[in-house]
Amino acid sequence: MTTPVLKRRCAVYTRKSTDEGLDQAFNSLDAQREACEAYVASQRGEGWILVGDRYDDGGFSGGSLERPGLRRLLDDIQAGKVDCVVVYKIDRLTRSLMDFSRLVDLFEKRSVTFVSVTQSFNTTTSMGRLTLNILLSFAQFERELGSERVRDKIAASKRRGIWTGGVVPLGYKAENRKLVIQPADAEIVRRIFKSYLTLRSITKVLRELDAAGIRQRTGRPFDKVVLHKILKNRTYRGMTVHKAEAYPGQHEAIIDEALWNEVRSINQEPPRTRARAAAARDVALLRGLIFGPDGWAMTPQHARNNGRLYRYYVSMVTIKRGENEGLRRVPAGPIDQAVIDQIRQLVRAPEIVARTIRTAGVSAQAVHEALADFDRIWNELFPAEQARLVRLLVERVDVREDGIRVRLRTEGLRDVIHELQGSPALEQAA
């Protein structure tokens, strides 16, 4: 009586590090697959059969497991669809000892064997695993050596001022491995530098760009992170940067030396010094939130008399048309204080506090501490920080003949808690 031969479902995996030549009729992946299929065919008497799916990764490094073909193969192994993995050489599967160890663990858990058609070993024995580890050690060494060569080449190129690729900075385009100025985008970069030199505030530059409808190349508005990178990017000064070193680049500078140095001197100021200076120039608490009885927006203005500063909110109809009838100008101090008093009532309301605890995503103790110490924290904040909190809590302020009406955003208290948690004042209170 003959023992029936058990079928072994074999999956062939192929990989090539670059996509060079993959468009050919017969490429490296095809050659690997042909050799593996021939090996499986030679084992047909042992019950080996090919699975129908192909697991190919063209243009993917062996230093990572994040490859679409490999991920599909591992998913099928987990699903019990594969009994044996066949590769041309072991480094086609991975070049990392750590990754290989993880794969072997998975294979053993699923009773999957692993075969390299050009290297004879058996993963079920300790000697076979030792052989594999030795082979993987050399494969990993080869990969790391190649990476070092690439890094050395990039460093040498940058020392010569050559653009070596990556994200092309706004204002340039890459042509034949060189950066070439795009005039329209370059003007945006110059505007950002000049505006920052005048306003000395990233936030104000953002407002100006938004008001002018200026966007990034992606169509998205600028943000603080992007502007910080632009203002510190030495590429605009005509330099090529490698790690902490900068070398004269082969591309044309967008920003001249005088403007670059002036902006750099601002960036070297302590952040608190810049914040105080910006706050002193922009202390309008209700900018963009206050409206007159006729529905016209009111904008902050100030005047000096005998050395004293007087602040007002003035209706835009007065500024645009010169109309002064009715309630067109109100002193800023009393209006600001009335709004602050409304906010203080809001943060003390028990039902509002309870709702905030449920939705803030922080502990009840943190909410109670922040709100209980709100008055002291408020007094220690910079004016710009106070204005930001007001915008989180106030939707609109309407000036009436008989007083003001404040429309509050009660759901904004959750955001205020997060703002206060990150403020130096709250950290000192804690």
Image: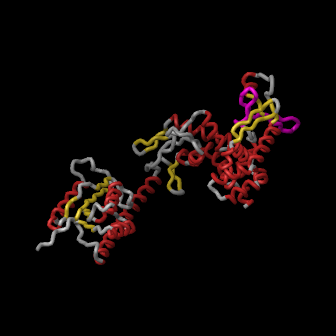
- The quarter of the picture where residue 408 lies is top right
Q: Residue placed farthest to the right in the image? A: 306
The way the protein has been coloured in the rendering is secondary structure
Q: Residue placed farthest to the bottom in the image? A: 126
Q: Nearer the viewer, residue 244 or 54?
A: 54
Locate residue 162 relative to residue 224 in the image: left or right: left
Q: Which residue is at a point 49% across and 48% down the rendered structure image?
A: 249
Quarter containing the N terminus: bottom left
Residue 259 location (% of width, % of height): 62, 42
Q: Which residues are the magenta region? A: 287-312
Quarter containing the C terminus: bottom right
Residue 203 location (% of width, % of height): 65, 43
Q: Nearer the viewer, residue 110 or 288?
A: 110
Examine the structure image and report whether residue 69 is included in the region drawn in magenta. Answer: no
Q: Which residue is at a point 71% across and 30% down the rendered structure image?
A: 297
Residue 212 location (% of width, % of height): 60, 33
Q: Nearer the viewer, residue 293 or 297?
A: 293
Q: Is residue 358 above or below residue 338?
A: below
Q: Which residue is at a point 66% across and 52% down the rendered structure image?
A: 418
Examine the structure image and report whether residue 303 is included in the region drawn in magenta. Answer: yes
